[in-house]
Image: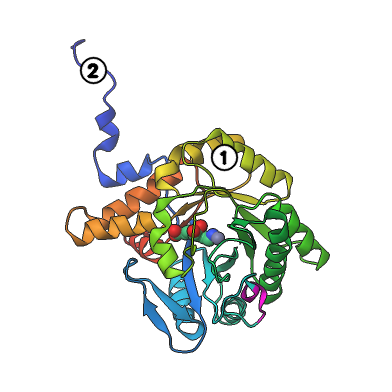
Amino acid sequence: MSELPTRRSRRLRQSAILRRQVAETRLHPASFVLPLFVVPGRGVANPIKSMPGHSQLSVDELIPVVKEAASVGVGGVILFGIPADKDEVGSGAWDPNGPVPEAIRAIKDEVEDITVWADVCMCEYTSHGHCGVLKGDSVDNDETLPLLARASNAYAEAGADVIAPSDMMDGRVAAIRDGLDEAGYTELAICSYSAKYASAYYGPFRDAAESAPAFGDRRTHQMDPPNVREALVEVSLDLAEGADMVMVKPAGPYLDVISAVRSRVDVPVVAYQVSGEFSMIEAAAANGWVDGERVMLESLTAIARAGAGITLTYFATRAARALAEV
Ligand code: PBG
Ligand code: ZN
């Protein structure tokens, strides 16, 4: 008898319901945020080739997509704009009639129970595709800050629930916070993309947002992939500047970073499962090489297990629906 193991881990794995009861991590649709790409015009829905199921949408086409997400309990959408015209300084970013402010107003008017996050960066709006104004071949940090603040105020004015700067300029959270406070938006939350890496996983997004840099790359402002301690410095700086939530991006290949940030801070930790993560899963699933539905939920579970309380994911609506079926 004594040769039998006294502890048998298999006992708690005997049925689906028992496994669900002892699960340490639970996914919930309210923790998902769906990224959407907004274009000018009406009746526009341009499928994004590298991101099956996703399209650039004009505001009227976007509304049913947001309604569908809300109907399955998705917690939020994050908006990226593709303006009609681009210029050197990206002035379309603060146009009150640009696609993003227009979409924010329409969602706030027509959809209940979903938060609207506004991504803030200049790269969709500049003719050169860089995340700020250029001095020579390099992004000028301090000249870019007021532009980011100006864009943030335009999204605040339109009714955004969360301002999410993704540009990775130093001091941007403070500049945006000041701008919002001065305009009276003291209650509006900032989720900073604090640990945003210079990642090759953003490939499909740059097609979707038409935001690829015309020359060079983003390595002088986005983080270098080998570093995790530096992510903690970025997070501390952003919190000191007034960030209400902090983000790690990408998510799946950076679970150690999510975990390190989670153990260090008590504000919500947000992760972004980026376009390349989504497209790789979709491509493998389309080839029949993996079970796409299972990898979708497993990848989101891993991100939550690492410590993310909120996940930006292109699977948001699909995953919410899948969870409703469990
Ligand atoms: C803009 C921005 C990018 C993403 C979110 N905001 C692209 C980039 O930095 O080049 C990537 C999102 C994704 O890949 O899904 N700064
Ligand atoms: Zn950018």
Q: Which residue is mark 1?
A: 231
Mark 1: which amino acid? Ala
Mark 2: which amino acid? Pro
Horizontal and vertical percent for residue 249? 49, 50
Most prominent secondary structure in the magenta stretch?
helix
**Residue 104 sits in quarter:** bottom right
Residue range (magenta): 91-96
As drawn, the label of residue 5 is 2
> Within 10 Å of the Cα at label 1, are there few (<14), some (14-19), or many (20+) other Cα atoms?
many
Looking at this rendering, what residue extends furthest in the front direction? 136
Q: Nearer the viewer, mark 2 or mark 1?
A: 1
- Residue at point 42% right, 40% down? 24
In the picture, measured across the screen, residue 22 lies left or right of residue 74, that is left
Q: Nearer the viewer, residue 248 or 2?
A: 248
- Residue at point 28% right, 60% down? 282
Identify the image quadrant of the N terminus. Answer: top left
In the picture, measured across the screen, residue 297 lies left or right of residue 76, that is left
**Residue 234 sits in quarter:** top right
One can see residue 266 in this view: no
Q: Nearer the viewer, residue 47 or 68?
A: 47
Horizontal and vertical percent for residue 44? 43, 85
